[in-house]
Amino acid sequence: MTSSSASAFAGFRFPREVISVAVRWYLRYGLTYRDVEELLAERGVDVDHVTVYRWVQRFTPEFVGAARTRRHVPGDRWFVDETYVKVNGLWTYLYRAVDQFGQVIDVWLSIRRDLTAARTFFNRALATGAVPVEVTTDRAPAYPRVLDELIPAALHNTEQYANNRVEADHGRLKARLRPMRGLKTFRSARTLATGHAFIQNLKRGHYDIATDAPVHHRLLTAFDELALAI
């Protein structure tokens, strides 16, 4: 945020500190919107869970965007896989990639598991500025075609068990989704997947933000700092 531009928090009834903590709690912990409403009420803040939902949808992209230039460039060994996520009663495909350092490179939610979805995902991942020398995937037929097209020099590894790193990482997202009993909209599912990856990367030190803060205070410090830039 420049001195001449208005804060994204301008016009909201609640101060930025309340909105920031609500978004952080929701993305970090296995909470529902009603859980966040209750926790805020215990601290004297009376806000409806629908408002918390709107804050999460509105400000998650703002926090991610404010941190973008301070993110570490991903490594050159990528582990890519998809997992199932239920949205409004239908199973969808969530593409995720992590590097050899545990950084979540990107996430992408798609209705289909096909060539178009794989190409979209890899184009997004390459937009981070990293170019992998090795990409590990399962044996889905779309991957060889997309890699030959976009990253022809990369080694494509499809050996069994080679992708355990990203499959284990899926478990953290699944644990976050479990209390929610399914997501209601495609938009909210994408927001949560993106926000969850952002939280993981902040906690693991993949941004030049709050690096001097104690580990248990890193998210709080980072969100407070980023909120001032939004």
Image (spheres, helix red, strand yellow):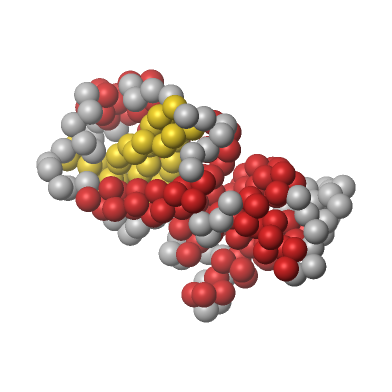
Q: Residue at x 15, y 47 (%)?
A: 161
* Residue 4 visible in the displayed image: no
> In this orientation, which residue lies closer to the viewer: 94 or 127?
94
The quadrant holding residue 111 is top left
Q: Position of residue 176 (x, y in %)?
A: 46, 52
- Residue 178 is situated, as x and y percent measured from the top left of the image, at 44, 49
Instruction: From the top left corner, tell me how far across and down residue 23 is, in percent.
Output: 64, 55
Q: Is residue 224 visible?
A: yes
Which residue is at a point 34% across and 25% down the rendered structure image? 113
118 shown above or below 96:
above
- 229 left or right, relative to 164: right
Question: Which image quadrant for residue 109?
Answer: top left
Q: Is residue 169 above or below residue 41?
A: above
What residue lies at 60% left-to-right and 65% top-to-bottom? 222
Query: Total number of numbered labels?
Result: 0
Q: Is residue 153 left or right of residue 93?
A: left
Q: Is residue 144 above or below residue 167?
A: above
Residue 52: percent from the left, percent from the top?
A: 70, 49
Q: Quadrant of residue 45?
A: bottom right
In-front residue for pair 128/228: 228
Q: Look at 63% across and 50% down and name the residue there.
A: 33
Question: In the current view of this chain or complex, which residue is farthest to the left?
Answer: 159
